Image (tube, rainbow, N blue to C red):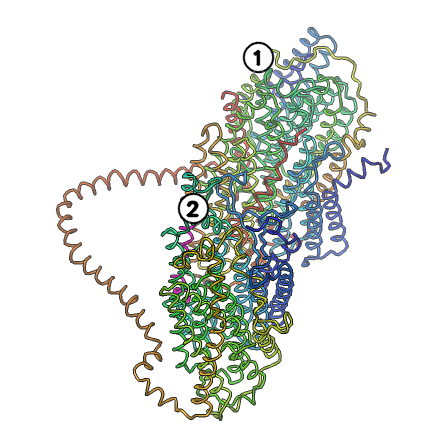
């Protein structure tokens, strides 16, 4: 099978799975199920494409689908603020950063990724499937949580209060600020290029 | 939808993230894989927060995860650019001066 | 047994000041050894300043302790001063720490608590060490000027002082021993100070001397270690046996090194044993005394001390006055209740022999420091003999240790000043007439000579008079070899002391200059040296009895400051010396006046040996001065003729009774001969046997060799190879590729999870 | 709400050490921008002064009762112990930075800033029962460490070390956060003490219920979280990064990673386990589960120390040997954790102090010789002990201590570990004690090799420049190694007093 055909097959299977799960979700749990199925397909499909794709740029865009899918999950879980933050920071920030990385480096076009992906998936997938079987508990209701949910009560306002409430997260908030400062200084220090930091023989090999 | 559905998605995303880190020969994919793992735990937190009867802890954690991911991506990218500058390659396997 | 209220009269703050006493020189040492070279003036001011602080603390604390004592009526004991930091005080205050314990609970497992002990003896000794050390430091600034290892010298002498201060403050035998050993090490370094200096012309002598000092005292240290072990293990064994038999009431005990425990436990054993010391306790006591023999240079282990003169003169002053040799006597003071009458007799005999023996040698030596060295040995013999004479002599001997520290330090420093002034000339035959060139040194030396000779109103008189009185008293109480030797030898030794000391004075300071070269250069020493001399001379004069205490009691019948602080009836809380130690001493008298102590008191008052002693000591003083003056000042008697008259005896004395040679011929040659004999035995007998056995075993050997080669080696190699191979295998995983690492980690994590889930 | 009410003032006073570190770091950053200098130690001394001030405040607070600040920070003696430890370690690391000539050509201000930032991370990491704050502190420490590992940005090895570190670190952080999310799902809270409380009121479920109802999920969560900690303390199978990163990073940073960062990881791990599983009031299921964790940790400990020692056997670079040896030492310390009782944890803390004393010395030695010779191989040390006897002898002291032979404090550390482990569960872990002893024997081989090269090989031509300050530090450390063997009680009492997690858990 040629590379192109393999890729087509992969996307076909993915699309089939996505539509199938969407339909199943609609049948089983109504609109919420449909939404869930769509976002799950978006998330997992995006991740799968990201791994599968040869081109880094396309992978990065596939990752965007994943991030958006997760944002969708936040929406149906009633955390609209999270969804917004996810879209703004992840899609707008982290992904943009990754794309910069893609543009600033020279991708390796000769990468043959399929065999390794197959082997890794088989191994790790097997191991993780085992863990999941233990975790979720096959056939046993180990989690014993509510099936139907009430309307969510937490709003963005509450999150804002929690950030600044001295009995809740103000320390974590301030620490995060300091963390960002440290990260910024670290990133700037490493990324800044000055000739005197490189002696000739070290920089060029 | 029960919690198991969300768990399934998050575990799958977690696994995909690890596969991404291990299998692709480009350091940027490693970063992407790490983002996937973090997103998987974000899903968990959000879902558990909802299913455990509301509250705010899970949501707060998600926000901090997002902050962490941004900070880490910044530092990681700086390091990656530095490595690329020195080794002229984005393959992690090319940088193997330190071994044994 | 004193009431517990009085056991810890000091406050925590005062304990902390006491703890600072040894720590200041220690801190100084650390600073000096690392940074001394770079400090201005190479750090001498730092060490001397530190010692000044130490002196201030010790003297202040001494007066605190003195304030807690009161004098008794008619020579009976007043209230004593005794403080031990580990014991809880009135407010439950403690100041102690556990040196070593292993498990979470302090009581379980091995636990060696330690603390400070500060009693009358300790207070006096600590003050003496502080004062003498400070003045020696001060003196050294001038004396050691220009030495190549100036900063190292100050560091070492500071640590030396630290060891002695720690030894005095220790409340248990183990720590005393640790500091004891540390002092041995430091004496080695200090005596060998010039051995490290490539420009010195006495490298070899210094190296040999320090080695000799270290090795000789090591013999005594080994004895002490044996004694400690015996005390630690045998006392509880015997005690618990008596408890089981009902002879002692109370609980069983565990081994302990603490002095208070040792005293009370040993005396309880003796009491339960009807006032008799068990034989093992005598042996243990003699082993402990072995430590004293080594450290305090008693016959036959005295040989290291004269050689120790190779060290710089300030070191000699330290060793001879306040630190090293005093430690041995101090140890006797601390362990006195453990000494049986039999052991005391041996101690008295050894001390008396040493006193006379060294005094005779001192008359023949021409090296100015050599005379002082033998005089030290002799005086130590006085102290030890006195302690051997029993309870009254105990205080006298310890008193002599204190007064001797002052005047001997001054004498050594004066000698150092003379040597310094004469450009490192030590031979008295080349000196003479220095009186006018070095007036201060002369005055100080004369004062201290009078003190050591026992001139009334000088410090030495008070202690030496008491020693001779104790010897006479002990002799008339109960006849034994030790008492006899003490009462006969000590007055003679005292006479000789006067003779050789005045011989030194006359030869050095009087008469005409003998060596033109030396005389030309002779000059008085700089101020910091003479200040030390004068201060110590003042103490040597007044230290025995401070007049302002009882202005009219010149004889000290109401007790001197020392007898007020240290009294044999009260210095060992928990021990009734009268019923344990004294019973054996006065055994023959069968308690005519009630207890043994009453006997003793009565006897002393009836006999009053003090006046005898007074007459004797003044008599010997006059004789000694007269003879010395006739021979060396007025030159009526020619020393050469005297020598000739003495004939063979003089040769013996001049050669130090050939002890060194005897040791060389017996111990060293003997060891060699033994080794040769063993070699002969080895070569001729053992080898023959081995050869024949060997031939029989040869065949067997081949078999063994085959097994060894093919099986044992195989296994050993296999193990080695496996280790190496496994090491390589571990390295195999370290491929340097980060993604493989991640894979391994994930795989390993899954395995771990599986293990955890399935286990 | 933002007025300075009581909550703020007491909270701020409780957080004084952290605030001092933050302020110092920002001051250093600002002064660096103003001074713009390279060959100066001024910034280093400012940093050390800040650390000293923080340590002073910590010492003042040592006797205080445990308290909460701002709801999620916990101020107790356990945290205090690790914070003081961090201050001491950071101060020495900064001293190393000042001593290392090779660091001079780089902009040095960021160095101190990042070290102080990492210190702030450690402070929060060891000082909280809240998993969110724990993760934040850990990430702060990690981010600073990544940059520090790659601080020599013009050098390939340094850059490679940073890359490996961030890949492994990012993965581990993700894994740990995932585990925490599961734990959060199981119990509904992020606070360890609340999670472990026996009644579990106000919670969907307590830990005890979770363990009985969904043991598989708890196990997976625990393994994932343990994985995150294991990475930080370089325990097998998450140790792979350690040798490479330790070798590639600048030596002061390696020292920081091997001592301060590792101790911080242990601090967080000990608190995590102690608060969750060692509360005497905890339900039986929880305590049983703790013992089960103990057997897992025992396995990890054995594997870790064996791998570390065997790999160290065949190294040619002293730095890499020390890296593997530090992996092995992590295994030793885990032995104390295995015991799952107070004594074991205290032994582990005691060993950390001993580890501080001996490892800082060994790295200081390496810093000196690598700075002089430019190499880090055994061969480059040939005969150097004779040329620089003070440093050589100090190194021998550290090596003896690292091997765990008397009379050095390392012996006491191992002794306490074995003592803590031997009685657990009727000698269930005797095999582990044996393993520890055998490993110590193996380690003797490669430690002695350093001494052999130092003293028994013929010296080369090279002469050594004296470094009095560094020499002084090494001698002090060597003396402390000896001193704390002879008089260990200050440390024993400090560690015993510091472990207040179990008795005072509300």
In this view, the residue in front, D332 or C667, is C667
SS of the residue under disc 2: helix
**D215 above or below C492?**
above
Chain of the residue under the numbered disc 1 shown in the image: A
Graded by Cα atoms within 10 Å as few (under 14), some (14 to 19) or many (20 or more), the crowding at tag 2 reads some
The dot on residue A138 is 1
Total marks in image? 2
Counting from the top left corner in percent of width and height, residue C380 is at 45, 69
The quadrant of the image that shows the C terminus of chain D is top right
Which region is colored magenta?
Answer: C213-235
Query: Residue D249, image x and y in percent?
Result: 58, 46
Instruction: Say above or below: A49 vs C520.
Output: above
Task: Look at mark 2 in the image and give the residue it sits on.
Answer: C272
Q: What residue is rendered at 45% in x and 39% in y?
A: C731
Residue at screen point 68% across, 46% down: D59
* Residue C50 picture quarter: bottom right
Q: Looking at the picture, how far across and down is residue A180, in whole percent?
A: 73, 39
Q: 10 Å neighbourhood of mark 1: few (<14), some, or many (≥20)?
A: few
> Left or right of C382: which side holds D475?
right
In this rendered view, identify the residue nearer to me: D465 or B30. D465
């Amino acid at each position: 099978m040629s590379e192109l055909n393999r890729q087509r097959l992969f996307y076909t299977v993915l699309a089939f799975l996505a539509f199938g799960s969407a339909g199943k979700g609609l049948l089983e749990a109504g609109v919420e199920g449909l939404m869930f199925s769509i976002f799950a397909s978006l998330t997992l499909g995006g991740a799968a494409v990201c791994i599968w794709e040869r081109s880094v740029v396309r992978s990065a865009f596939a990752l965007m689908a994943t991030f958006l899918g997760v944002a969708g999950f936040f929406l149906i879980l009633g955390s609209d603020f999270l969804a917004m933050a996810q879209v703004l920071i992840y899609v707008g920030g982290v992904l943009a950063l990754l794309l910069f990385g893609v543009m600033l480096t020279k991708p390796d076009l000769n990468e043959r990724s399929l065999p390794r992906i197959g082997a890794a998936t088989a191994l790790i997938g097997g191991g993780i499937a085992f863990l999941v079987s233990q975790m979720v508990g096959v056939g046993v209701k180990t989690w014993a949580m509510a099936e139907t949910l009430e309307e969510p009560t937490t709003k963005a306002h509450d999150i804002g209060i929690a950030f600044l409430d001295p009995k809740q997260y103000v320390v974590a908030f301030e620490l995060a600020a300091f963390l960002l400062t440290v990260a910024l200084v670290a990133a700037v220090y490493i990324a800044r290029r000055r000739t005197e930091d490189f002696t000739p023989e070290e920089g060029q090999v | 939808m029960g919690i198991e559905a969300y768990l399934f998605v998050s575990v799958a995303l977690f696994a995909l993230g690890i596969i991404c880190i291990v299998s692709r020969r480009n350091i940027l994919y490693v970063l992407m894989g790490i983002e996937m793992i973090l997103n998987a735990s974000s899903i968990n937190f959000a879902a558990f927060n909802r299913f455990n009867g509301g509250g705010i802890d899970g949501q707060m954690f998600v926000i901090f995860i997002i902050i962490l991911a941004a900070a880490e991506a910044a530092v990681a990218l700086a390091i990656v650019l530095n490595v690329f500058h020195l080794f002229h390659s984005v393959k992690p396997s090319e940088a193997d001066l330190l071994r044994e | 047994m004193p009431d517990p209220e009085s056991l810890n009269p000091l406050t925590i703050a005062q304990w902390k000041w006491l703890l600072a006493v040894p720590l200041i020189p220690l801190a100084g040492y650390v600073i000096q050894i690392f940074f001394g070279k770079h400090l201005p003036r190479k750090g001498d001011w730092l060490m001397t300043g530190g010692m000044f602080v130490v002196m201030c603390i010790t003297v202040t604390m001494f007066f605190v302790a003195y304030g807690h004592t009161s004098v008794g009526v008619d020579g009976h004991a007043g209230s004593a001063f005794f403080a031990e930091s580990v014991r809880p005080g009135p407010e439950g205050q403690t100041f102690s720490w556990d040196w070593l314990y292993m498990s979470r609970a302090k009581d379980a497992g091995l636990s060696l608590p330690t603390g400070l002990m500060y009693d009358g003896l300790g207070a006096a000794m600590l003050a003496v060490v502080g004062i003498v050390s400070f003045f020696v430091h001060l003196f050294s600034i001038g004396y050691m000027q220009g030495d190549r290892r100036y900063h190292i010298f100050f560091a070492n002498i500071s640590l030396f002082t630290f060891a002695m201060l720690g030894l005095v403050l220790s409340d248990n035998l183990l720590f005393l021993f640790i500091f004891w050993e540390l002092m041995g090490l430091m004496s080695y370094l200090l005596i060998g100070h010039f051995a490290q200096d490539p420009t010195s012309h006495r490298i070899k002598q210094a190296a040999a001397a320090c080695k000799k000092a270290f090795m000789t005292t090591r013999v005594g240290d080994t004895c002490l270690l044996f004694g400690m072990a015996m005390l630690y293990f045998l006392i509880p064994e015997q005690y618990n046996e008596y408890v089981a038999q009902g002879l002692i009431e109370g609980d069983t005990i565990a081994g302990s090194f603490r002095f208070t425990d040792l005293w009370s436990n040993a005396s309880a054993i003796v009491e339960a044993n009807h006032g008799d010391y068990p034989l093992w306790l005598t042996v243990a006591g003699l082993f402990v005394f072995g430590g004293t023999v080594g450290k305090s240079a008693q016959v036959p282990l005295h040989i290291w001390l004269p050689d120790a003169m190779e060290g710089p003169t300030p070191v000699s002053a330290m060793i001879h006055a306040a630190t090293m040799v005093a430690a041995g006597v101090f140890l006797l003071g601390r362990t006195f209740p453990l000494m049986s009458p039999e052991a005391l007799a041996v101690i008295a005999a050894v001390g008396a022999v040493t006193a006379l023996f060294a005094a005779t040698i001192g008359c023949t030596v021409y090296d100015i420091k050599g005379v002082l060295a033998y005089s030290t040995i002799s005086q130590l013999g006085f102290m030890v003999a006195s302690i051997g004479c029993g309870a009254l002599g105990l205080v006298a001997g310890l008193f002599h240790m204190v007064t001797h520290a002052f005047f001997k330090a001054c004498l050594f420093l004066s000698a150092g000043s003379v040597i310094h002034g004469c450009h490192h000339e030590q031979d008295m035959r080349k000196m003479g007439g220095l009186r006018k060139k070095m007036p201060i040194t002369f005055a100080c030396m004369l004062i201290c000579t009078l003190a050591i000779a026992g001139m009334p109103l000088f410090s030495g008189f008070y202690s030496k008079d008491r020693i001779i009185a104790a010897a006479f008293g002990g002799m008339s109480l109960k006849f034994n070899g030790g008492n006899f030797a003490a009462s006969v030898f000590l007055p003679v030794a005292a006479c000789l002391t006067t003779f050789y000391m005045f011989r030194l004075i006359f030869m050095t300071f009087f008469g005409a200059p003998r060596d033109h070269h030396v005389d030309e250069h002779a000059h008085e020493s700089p101020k910091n040296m003479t200040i030390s001399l004068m201060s110590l001379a003042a103490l040597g004069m007044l230290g025995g009895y401070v007049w302002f205490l009882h202005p009219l009691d010149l004889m000290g019948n109401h007790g001197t400051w020392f007898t007020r602080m240290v009294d044999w009836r009260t210095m060992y809380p928990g021990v009734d010396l009268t019923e344990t130690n004294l019973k054996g001493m006065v055994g023959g008298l069968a308690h005519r006046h009630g207890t043994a102590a009453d006997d003793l008191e009565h006897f002393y008052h009836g006999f009053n040996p003090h006046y005898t002693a007074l007459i004797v000591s003044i008599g010997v003083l006059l004789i000694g001065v007269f003879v010395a003056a006739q021979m060396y000042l007025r030159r009526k008697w020619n020393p050469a003729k005297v020598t000739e008259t003495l004939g063979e005896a003089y040769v013996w004395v001049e050669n130090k009774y050939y002890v060194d040679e005897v040791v060389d011929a017996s111990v060293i040659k003997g060891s060699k001969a033994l080794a040769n004999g063993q070699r002969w035995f080895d070569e001729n007998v053992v080898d023959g046997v081995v050869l024949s056995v060997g031939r029989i075993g040869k065949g067997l050997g081949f078999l063994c060799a085959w097994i060894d080669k093919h099986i044992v080696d195989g296994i050993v190699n296999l193990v080695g190879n496996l280790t190496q191979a496994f090491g390589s295998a571990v390295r195999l995983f370290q491929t340097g590729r980060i993604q493989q690492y991640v894979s391994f980690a994930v795989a390993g994590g899954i395995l771990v999870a599986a293990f955890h889930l399935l286990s | 709400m933002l007025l300075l009410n009581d909550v703020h003032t007491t909270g701020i006073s409780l957080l004084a050490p952290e605030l001092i570190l933050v302020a110092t770091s920002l001051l250093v950053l600002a002064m660096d921008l103003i001074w713009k200098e390279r060959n100066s130690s001024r910034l280093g001394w400012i940093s050390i002064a800040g650390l000293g001030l923080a340590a002073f405040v910590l010492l003042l607070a040592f006797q205080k009762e445990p308290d909460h600040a701002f709801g999620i920070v916990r101020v107790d003696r356990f945290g205090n112990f690790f914070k003081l430890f961090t201050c001491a370690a950071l101060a020495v690391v900064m001293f190393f930075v000042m001593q290392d000539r090779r660091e001079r050509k780089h902009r040095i201000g960021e160095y101190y800033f990042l070290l102080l930032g990492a210190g702030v991370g450690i402070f929060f990491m060891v000082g909280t029962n809240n998993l969110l704050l724990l993760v934040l502190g850990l990430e702060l420490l990690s981010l600073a460490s990544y940059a520090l590992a790659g601080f020599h940005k013009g050098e390939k090895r340094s850059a490679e070390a940073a890359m490996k570190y961030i890949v492994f670190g990012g993965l581990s952080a993700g894994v740990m956060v995932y585990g925490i999310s599961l734990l959060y799902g199981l119990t509904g809270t992020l606070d360890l003490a609340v999670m472990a409380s026996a009644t579990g009121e106000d919670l969907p479920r307590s830990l005890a219920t979770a363990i009985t109802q969904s043991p598989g999920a708890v196990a997976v969560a625990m393994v994932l979280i343990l994985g995150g900690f294991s990475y930080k303390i370089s325990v097998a199978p998450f140790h792979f990064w350690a040798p490479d990163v330790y070798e590639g990073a600048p030596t002061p940073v390696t020292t920081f990673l091997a001592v301060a960062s590792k101790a911080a990881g242990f601090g967080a791990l000990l608190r995590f386990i102690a608060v969750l599983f060692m509360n005497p009031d905890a339900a039986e299921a929880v305590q049983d589960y703790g013992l089960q964790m103990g057997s897992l940790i025992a396995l990890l400990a054995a594997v870790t120390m064996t791998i570390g020692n065997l790999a160290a056997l065949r190294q040619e670079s002293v730095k890499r040997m020390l890296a593997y040896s530090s992996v092995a030492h992590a295994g030793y310390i885990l032995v104390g954790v295995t015991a799952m009782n107070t004594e074991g944890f205290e032994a582990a803390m005691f060993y950390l102090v001993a580890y501080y004393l001996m490892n800082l010395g060994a790295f200081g030695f390496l810093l000196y010789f690598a700075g002089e010779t430019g190499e880090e191989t055994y061969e480059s040390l040939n005969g150097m002990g004779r040329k620089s006897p003070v440093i050589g002898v100090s190194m021998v002291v550290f090596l003896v201590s690292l091997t765990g032979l008397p009379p050095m404090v390392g012996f006491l550390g191992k002794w306490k570990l074995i003592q803590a482990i031997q009685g657990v569960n009727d000698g269930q872990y005797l095999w582990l004690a044996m393993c520890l002893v055998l490993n110590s024997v193996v380690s003797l081989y490669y430690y002695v090799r350093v001494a052999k090269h130092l003293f028994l090989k013929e010296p080369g031509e090279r002469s050594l420049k004296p470094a009095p300050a560094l020499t002084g530090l090494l001698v002090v450390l060597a003396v402390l190694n000896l001193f704390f063997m002879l008089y260990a009680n200050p440390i024993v009492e400090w560690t015993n007093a510091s472990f207040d997690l179990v008795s005072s858990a509300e």
